[in-house]
């Protein structure tokens, strides 16, 4: 029951920004527009297409092949027709003369025949069909590509989570500069009022001239702080717009409130959730399965492949159809690699070593994740306490400043006391603003470290 309660608290903590509609709006823009995430999405699409390519290996391959050749010269072969027939004809002619009734037998002389090995004109047009019947590599390769698709999906989700975290942190940093700038501008009004009061007191001969100069110097010094704050605000806005791939000068809407959490979470539950949810560990699991498939692919070379091959077409010196031109062939092809210099055996050993390395990498990744969760957990607790103390500090400093300010305007406190009280209040307000957004960033870091379930 304790674990169930802690898990519910965890889910509440992870979804603390569920109502942060403005921030959610920017997160959606970033997911749609971010260039790096688009690149990761394209890699996923490419892996899915590779899977379709692997599946297509099951289908037959039908090709059209056409060739027309003209040849001149080349090797020849001789047929000694004259050497074979001329003695026969000569003997028959002589024999016919000694017969009781002589007959005229033509005296024929036949030349030897010479033929070119290459025909002057030749064409071959055919369709070829290849259909795998049994090929273990095709099956394993399809299974491997399925796992590659899953790995790319995890990579895309990891990139998406990192982007959401970066957007949140960038937005908090932007709001930090906005609030600091507003606080400095509010303090500037206090210093302007102080200058006005000092000038009034000087006119009424209640203070000396150096009080007026000191007030002007403090105001000028503060103007420099405001200029620096404006620069940081512009840089933070530019980075945020770049991150979500918007125009660099686009205005950013401010979200005034966030759903802070006061829950104290169980560290061990957070570690278990991180080990269960982190995409990096799931990627390593799939990488291990992929290397196992590579072992199987290399071992499949010991298994024969069986396929059917057929051809149908026409051959001859001219394009024509008929018994003298048409031909058909069909084959059952068995391919078996019997020996390849122990190449496959070495590849299998390499792939098995890769599997062992994945186990080591996973164990190392688990240790790093545990450390990340512990750091994020204690940072979150620390920032939560700091936020509480900074609020109290600002409240006290603000109350003290109001008292000193009232005394100063009544001539009961010195300018030095006034400026010291103002500086203390400004410092406390800045620290309160900084601590608030550091706490939100710490929560975002904890959320990103734990990751979200698929």
Image (cartoon, grey):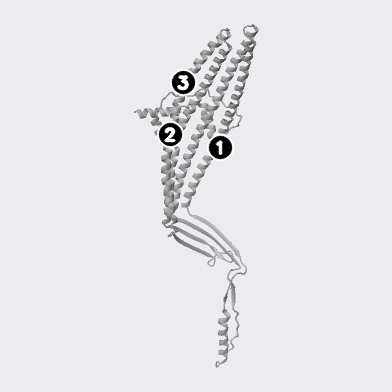
Separation of marks 3 and 2 at Cα, in angstroms: 26 Å
Q: First in sequence: mark 3 or mark 2?
A: 2
Residue sitting at x 46%, y 31%: 447
Q: Position of residue 216 (x, y in %)?
A: 63, 15
The quadrant in which residue 186 appears is: top right
Q: Residues within 10 Å of mark 2 (few under 14, many from 20)?
A: few
State the SS at label 2.
helix
Q: Left or right? Give the position of 1 relative to 156.
A: left
Closest to the observer: 364 or 443?
Answer: 364
Mark 2 or 1: the one toward you: 2
Q: Is residue 202 above or below residue 301?
A: above
Q: Residues within 10 Å of mark 3 (few under 14, many from 20)?
A: few
Q: Position of residue 135 (x, y in %)?
A: 43, 54
Q: Is residue 375 above or below residue 130?
A: above
User: Where the N terminus falls, by quadrant?
Assistant: top left
User: Where the C terminus falls, by quadrant?
Assistant: top left
Separation of marks 2 and 1 at Cα, in angstroms: 31 Å
The quadrant in which residue 427 appears is: top right
Mark 3 or 1: the one toward you: 3
Q: First in sequence: mark 3 or mark 1?
A: 1
Q: Which residue is mark 2?
A: 371
Q: Which residue is mark 3?
A: 388
Q: First in sequence: mark 2 or mark 1?
A: 1
Q: Which residue is mark 1?
A: 35
Q: Is residue 391 visible?
A: yes
Furthest-bottom residue in this view: 100
Residue sitting at x 57%, y 60%: 66
Separation of marks 3 and 1 at Cα, in angstroms: 39 Å
Q: Are marks 3 and 1 in contact (CB under 8 Å)?
A: no
Q: Residues within 10 Å of mark 1 (few under 14, many from 20)?
A: some
Q: Is residue 332 above or below residue 231?
A: below
């Amino acid at each position: 029951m304790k674990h169930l309660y802690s898990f519910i608290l965890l889910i509440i903590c992870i979804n603390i920004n569920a109502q942060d509609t403005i921030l959610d709006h920017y997160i959606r823009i970033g997911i749609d527009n971010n260039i790096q995430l688009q690149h990761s999405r394209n890699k996923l699409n490419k892996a899915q297409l590779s899977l379709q390519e692997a599946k297509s290996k099951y289908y037959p391959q039908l090709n059209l092949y056409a060739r027309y050749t003209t040849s001149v010269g080349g090797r020849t072969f001789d047929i000694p027709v004259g050497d074979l027939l001329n003695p026969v004809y000569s003997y028959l002619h002589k024999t016919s003369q000694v017969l009781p009734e002589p007959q005229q037998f033509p005296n024929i002389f036949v030349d030897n025949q010479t033929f070119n090995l290459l025909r002057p004109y030749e064409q071959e047009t055919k369709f070829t069909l290849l259909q795998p019947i049994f090929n273990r590599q095709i099956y394993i390769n399809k299974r491997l590509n399925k796992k590659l698709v899953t790995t790319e999906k995890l990579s895309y989700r990891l990139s998406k989570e990192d982007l959401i975290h970066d957007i949140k942190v960038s937005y908090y940093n932007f709001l930090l500069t906005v609030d600091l700038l507003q606080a400095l501008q509010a303090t500037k009004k206090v210093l302007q009022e102080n200058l006005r009061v000092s000038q009034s007191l000087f006119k009424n001969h209640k203070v000396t001239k150096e009080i007026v100069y000191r007030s002007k110097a403090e105001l000028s010094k503060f103007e420099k702080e405001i200029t620096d704050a404006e620069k940081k605000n512009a840089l933070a806005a530019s980075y945020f717009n770049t991150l979500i791939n918007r125009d660099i000068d686009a205005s950013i809407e401010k979200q005034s409130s966030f759903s802070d959490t006061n829950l104290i979470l169980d560290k061990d539950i957070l570690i278990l959730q991180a080990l269960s949810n982190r995409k990096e560990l799931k990627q390593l699991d799939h990488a291990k399965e992929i290397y196992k498939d590579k072992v199987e692919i290399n071992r499949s070379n010991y298994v024969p492949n069986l396929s059917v091959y057929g051809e149908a077409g026409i051959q001859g010196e001219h394009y024509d159809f008929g018994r003298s031109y048409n031909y058909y062939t069909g084959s059952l092809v068995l391919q078996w690699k019997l020996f390849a210099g122990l190449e496959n055996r070495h590849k299998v050993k390499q792939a098995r070593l890769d599997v062992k390395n994945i186990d080591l990498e996973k164990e190392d990744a688990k240790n790093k994740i545990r450390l990340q969760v512990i750091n994020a957990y204690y940072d979150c607790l620390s920032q939560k306490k700091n936020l509480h103390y900074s609020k109290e500090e600002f409240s006290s400093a603000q109350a003290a400043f109001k008292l000193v300010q009232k005394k100063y305007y009544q001539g009961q406190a010195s300018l030095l006391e006034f400026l010291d009280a103002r500086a203390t209040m400004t410092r406390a307000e800045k620290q309160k603003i900084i601590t608030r957004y550091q706490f939100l960033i710490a929560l975002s870091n904890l959320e990103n470290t734990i990751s979200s379930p698929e």
